[in-house]
Image: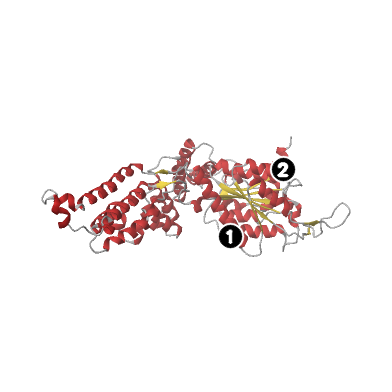
Amino acid sequence: MIADFHFLRPFWLAALLGPPAIIWMASRSSDFRNRWKGMIAPHLLDSLIVQPDRRHRYGPAWVLATLLSLAIVGVAGPTWRREAPPFVSDTASLVIVVDLSPTMDAIDISPSRIERVKLKIHDILATRNGARTAVVAYSGSAHLVVPLTDDIELIETYTDALATGIMPKPGKDTAAAIRLADALLKQDGSAGTIALLTDGVEPAASEAGKEVGSAIVVLGVGTAEGGVVKQADGGFLTTAGGARLTAKLDADALTKFGDDTNADVATVTDDDTDIRWLAQRVRTNFAQQTATQGDRWHDLGWWLILPTMLLSALSFRRGWVVKLSALLLAIQVYPSSAFAVDFASMWLTPDQQGRRSYQQGDFLQAAEHFHDPMWKGVSFYRAGRFQDAIDAFASVDNAESWYNQGNALMHLGKVEEAVTAYGKALETRKDWPDAVANRAIAEELLKLEKDKEHEQQQDPNQKPDSVQFDDQGKKGKAGEVTVAEQTSEMWMKNIQVSPADLMARKFAIEAKGAEP
C-alpha cells in the first residue's frame, strides 16, 4: 500500500501553503501588545492591555487551517489501490465446464448428477444479466459446446441436450477442459471465470489450473456416500467383478485442487445457495482481475468530506469568523454539491447516473445521462433505438464501435452496410470471433436477398428451355444454406436432428482429428 500511495491531482498540494499563512496572520492579528507598543509607553503597556483567554486565542484560525488542509488533501485525490472499470457486473465473462464422464450418471443426487447440473446451469444463466457465457464439455477429451454469447436460449438448448453418451472418449481429462476454457477467455481478450462442475479431478488438473490466467471456481456434484451409476438403457454400470459401481464425490481431490490453484470450492445444494455463491465469486474475480490489470486508481479523497463537514459545524459558534470562510471553501472545493439541482447530481457524475439507470433497466434515461459515446450507444441499442445507437457509436473509431454499428445496422435491415461495418471492425481487431461470425451471417443474408431479387426479376410466364428433376432432396440454389452460416434462430428452426446428435457427431470428428 505504501509503495502505491500517490495523489491523482498532486498540483493541488501547493495550496497547503495557505493554512500556515492563515495561522501566522491570525497570530499577528491577535498580538495586542505589538499593535499598541508604538502608541503607549512600555511601562504602561502591560497594565493597560487586557489579553483574551489564551485557551481560545487561536481556535478559529486553527480550525480553519485544519479544515482547509483536509479539503486540499481530499481534492488532491489520495489513492493507493486500483479499482475495476465501470459495468463490471455487466461484462464479467464465464465459461461453464461440465464433466460428462460416466460417473456423472450416478443417482445419489435426484434425478442424477448430470440432470442436476443442467438445472444448475439454468439457475446460473438467470444471474448473468446479459453477460456472456460459454460452455465446455469433457470426459476423455474436451470440446466446445457453445462459444461466449449472451443468447441464453441458445445456451439452454444445448446444455439441456448434454449427456454422458455423446462423448467420444472415456475417462476424465480435466486439464484439457481447463486449458480450452482459458483459451476462450484469452481469445476474447476479456478477464473472466471458469466454473468447473464435476464430481472429482485427477492430479494432472492441478498443473493446468496453475498455468491458466483465469480464475477458477469449482462446484462439486455428488455426495460423500455416493450412488450407483445408471446407464441410458436402464441398467447400471458395473465393476470388473460384476458388482454395481458406486461413485462417490471425490471431496479430497477437489479440496487439494482448490489449495493448489487458489480456486474456490463448494458443493451443490438443494436450494440456490450454491448459485448465489458462484455468482458472487464471478463478480469478485472479475473485479480483482480488471482492477489489477487496469489503469484506474480509486480516488479515496472523498473520505475526507466527513471530517471537513464536522469542522465546518464549529463555524456556527458565536464569535468565530470561520463561517464565511467555510462556506466559500465548500463552494470552491465541492461546487457540484453547492449548485446541485437534485440529490443524484450532488453525489454522482453523469456517467455514474447513467450507470444507475442502465442497471435499473431504464435505458433511455441512461442514454440521456451518459457522456461516454460507447455507453450512450449501448443504452440506445438496448432501448431499441438503433439509429440513435449508430449515431452515438459513429463518434468513436475503434473495433468495438464498428462491431456495435454492424449489430445495430442488422436490426435496421441494412445488411450491406452491416457487412462493411464488420469488415471495419476486423481491420482493427483481426480474427475477432464475434465479428467474423456476424459478418458471415450478414454476408449469407445479403446473398439470399440478392438471389431473391434476381428470381423476382425473371419473367414468370417465360417457358423453360428444359425441365430437370432434382434427385438430391429438392435442394434448390435459393433454398440451400449451410448450417454454419445461418443465425442461431434459423439454425434451430431448420435443424433436422437433435442437438445431442449434432454434438455427438461434432465431438467425434474433433476427437478423431486430434489423434496422432
The vertical placement of 363 against 189, above or below, is below
Q: Earlier in the sequence, mark 2 or mark 1?
A: 2
Residue 220 or residue 493, whichever sits in front: 220
Q: Which residue is mark 1?
A: 276
Residue 215 or residue 161, whichever sits in front: 215
Residue type pointed to by label 1: Arg
The answer to whether one can see residue 117 in this image is yes
Secondary structure at numbered mark 1: helix
Q: CA distance from mark 2 to mark 1?
A: 29 Å
Along the horizontal axis of the image, is 314 left or right of 157?
left
Residue type pointed to by label 2: Ala
Q: Which residue is mark 2?
A: 204
Residue 245 or residue 483, whichever sits in front: 245
Q: Which label was assigned to residue 121?
A: none
Q: Position of residue 449 (x, y in %)?
A: 50, 45
Along the horizontal axis of the image, is 47 left or right of 453?
left
Hey, which residue is sitting farthest right in the picture?
A: 241
